Amino acid sequence: MEVITFGESMVLFYPDATGPLRYATSFRKTIAGAESNVAIAMARLGHSVGWFSKLGADEFGRYILSVIRGEGVDVSRVLTDPARNTGLLFKERFGFSNPNIYYYRKDSAASSLSAADLDAAYISGVRILHITGITPALSPAARGAVFEAIRIAKESNVLISFDPNIRLKLWNIETAKPILLEIASKADILLIGEDEGKLLIGTEVPEKIAEAFMNKGCSTVVVKLGKKGCYAENLKEKAYVEGYLIEKVEDTVGAGDGFSAGFLAGILRGLGLREAAEYGNGVGAMATLVSGDMEGFPTYEQLMTFIGKTGYVDR
């Protein structure tokens, strides 16, 4: 296994029409979850990936497990909690603006994930452990699981990748900030949005964000800049890497997770900082072409064509 990640995945209901949810009468069902998004995207790019969580012993949990397993992700460490439900969320769409999100995840099965649920051998046998700031926001028990996973990874020389993925509907910034900064200080690779830099250290300037977190111990910092691309820095080089122009964006949700997957795929393939960032920009851009959190993630061959590394034959 090359990469392991863990966290809550939920069933997403996506209305067929735009406008307030109170007027929606039909919905499309899919799944959503930052960590499973990364896992699915990396599996499509050809990497061996594991994802685990806790799911309810209900049809929604069985559906999530089936979808993620069907994408080629190892789910052998997923647990079931018969006393709790699987989380749900609904999107409310208005044209091409970012959707409103409504969560129904309080006391969900995933929120009961704890350090006792971790398989240390499973975590210690991979190259990268990818975590997000969503999981520690779920509950104190889930927060403990995150720090225990970090401890196991550190002892086993596993690279730690961290995306703060700040969700202020789950906790306030006063509570989140010291916890996320502590996790970031233990990460090898930090994948952070410029807006998150503002929340955590008070600046949106990419170079200053990178400098601050490099000083905290990260060896690679990538500042995600949306459609503009990213700023990437490690101990040897630094670079702005332009994004890819998408004329008609269908859905921005999942683009940041796609970026993380593409960048980590580049690292696993031994690419330099700039080329790994190109992979990240490419996967993130392609994610916006399709509605849904994970439906737009490309295969490796599709990514190579999109970023201009190979040609395309359509017939």
Image (cartoon, grey):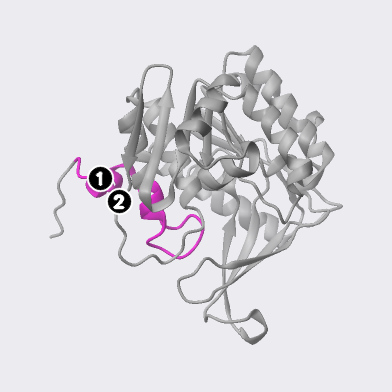
Q: Residues within 10 Å of mark 2 (few under 14, many from 20)?
A: some
Image coords of residue 130 (percent x, y): 57, 33
The part of the chain drawn in magenta is 283-309
Q: Is residue 166 highlighted in magenta?
A: no
197 or 40: which is nearer to us? 197
Identify the image quadrant of the C terminus.
bottom left
Q: What residue lies at 79% left-to-right and 42% top-to-bottom?
A: 175
64 or 111: which is nearer to us? 111
Which residue matches tag 1?
A: 307
Horizontal side of residue 18 vs 104, given as left or right:
left
Image coords of residue 155 (percent x, y): 66, 12
Residue 100 quadrant: bottom right
Task: Using the rendered image of the protein, determine whether residue 261 is visible from the camera's viewpoint.
Answer: yes
Horizontal side of residue 181 vs 290, given as left or right:
right
Residue 309 quadrant: top left
Sooner in the amino-acid sequence: mark 2 or mark 1? 2
Q: Residues within 10 Å of mark 1 (few under 14, many from 20)?
A: some
> Tags 2 and 1 in contact by the CB under 8 Å rule?
yes
The amino acid marked with disc number 2 is Tyr
Which residue matches tag 2?
A: 244
Q: Is residue 232 above or below residue 41?
A: above
Identify the secondary structure beneath mark 2: loop
Q: Is residue 96 above or below residue 59?
A: below
Identify the secondary structure beneath mark 1: loop
Q: What residue lies at 50% left-to-right and 29% top-to-bottom?
A: 210
153 or 182: which is nearer to us? 182
Q: Is residue 203 above or below residue 144?
A: below
- In the orientation shown, which residue stands out farthest toward the right? 83
Residue 235 quadrant: top left
The mark lying in front, picked from 2 and 1, is 2
Query: What's the CA distance linking mark 2 and mark 1?
Result: 8 Å
Q: What residue lies at 61% left-to-right and 83% top-to-bottom?
A: 24
